Image: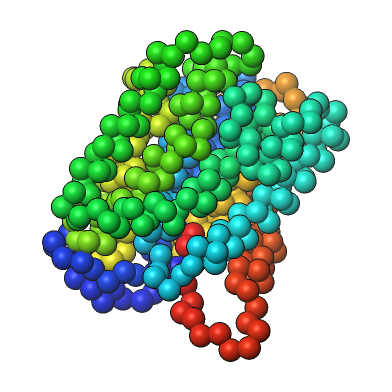
Amino acid sequence: MTTTSDKPSMQAAGEGRPIQQLSRLPSLTGLRIIAASMIYFFHAQFEDVFKSSNSQNVYVHILGEGGPSGVGFFYVLSGFLLAWSARSSDTARRFWRRRFFKIYPNHLVTYVIAFVLLIATGASTGILGPILNLFLIQAWSPRLLDVISVNPVAWSLGCEAFFYLLFPLWLRLVRRIRPERLWAVAIGLLAAMWAVPAIVGALPLPTGGPRVPFGNITGWQFLLAYTAPPVRTLDFVLGIVMAQIVITGKWIKLPLGWAFALFTASYLAAGLVPVMFRLVAITALPIALLIPAAAVADVDGTRSVFRTRTFVWLGDVSFAFYLWHRMVLKYGHQLLGAKHQWSTPEALLILVAGYALTVLLSALLHRFVEVPAMKRFSKPRPKRTIRETAAPALT
């Protein structure tokens, strides 16, 4: 999503009447880098760079829950932005084309680099995992090694691909809901997100195979409670519903600052609930409130630190950042010494340096792959004279 300096020409959201939509929501772009950073520092814990076990424990306690929360944020955000940007003049085929060229070129480039690095370091790749990863269907596998094959973080793109496939249907269904019933639907989706881990935890699932390194979760539990695209569709549809709540004037006027504080509190409280509920449920409601609050802040023109130029630029490269960060952490550590650990100041400096390197690589990928691919391929070339309304960038 890009930014705009246009002044909003509409009534404030939440006054019980429909609003005219802004095509650009810079605060939501800025928030993307917060979510991506949470995922970066979450994955950094698995590199175990701290020589002091106390420092490692403190780090995990503070930053050890950010990955699932960051992914959940992106899923709800995706549904919200696509619903917000949708126009009646658009078609499903044009929509699918734009989404393909938004995500796949970046995925393909980082996939190839990750595969080369695996071969160069003598790691075993197998056959099925890389194939599933290449075609973004690895999130459907109950085998953890398939889900995290090649570039481990790409599994989430498989969920996004599933979301995009069904988005025209979900949007049509949500738009049929009466405005006064939208909040009830949102609450129902949130209840389902809490029910899923409870149901999965009670199922007699196979227990063999590698386990997820946090929470001692089996591959089947991880699939059914976290990575399965149909399950994560709850997040995506929740985003669509929250966008419709704002568009139809049913927003509750929760200030952005309070919404962000609620999200922060739920993140810090995640360690107090069973691990299965930390994956999605604990931060689902705060995320569902934070995203509309940021959108309305842009609509109303109220103050938002996430609208600043730095945040927006980092948000623009956050998709590339997400695809790069795990490779930087893993192979950066191997380059410095695979089993080496450092003093607390040194370890923190290394993590910050890794973050900076990820930003640099992300800026390059965004500039030379993502943007050119979107400009060149996201729309069919006009043959003669085609009159159509240009759709705004979605994410």
Q: Height in image: 157 above or below 190?
A: below
- Which image quadrant is residue 347 in? top right
Q: Is residue 56 above or below residue 328?
A: above
In this rendering, does residue 282 appear at all? no
**Numbered marks: total:** 0
The residue drawn where x is 40% and y is 13% is: 202
Tell whether 94 sits left or right of 366.
left
Q: Residue 38, how many percent across, how many down?
A: 48, 39
| Horizontal arrangement in the rendering, residue 11 relative to residue 151 (left or right) | left
Residue pictured at 47% horizontal, 10% vertical:
204
Q: Is residue 372 above or below residue 99?
A: below
> Residue 298: percent from the left, percent from the top?
31, 64
> Which residue is located at x 19 percent, y 55 percent?
179
- In the rendered image, the residue lying farthest to the left is 16
Q: Residue 56 in the image: x percent, y percent?
A: 54, 21
- Colour scheme of this structure image? rainbow
Q: Position of residue 223 (x, y in %)?
A: 53, 26
Camera-nearest residue between 252 and 363:
252
Q: Residue at x 52, y 56 (%)?
A: 314
Question: From this viewpoint, is residue 175 visible?
Answer: yes
Residue 75, image quadrant:
top left
Residue 390 falls left or right of residue 353: left
Question: Which residue of the protein is positioned furthest toward the bottom in this rendering?
Answer: 385
Of residues 107 and 271, the one nearer the viewer is 107
In the displayed structure, 355 sits above or below 123; it is: below
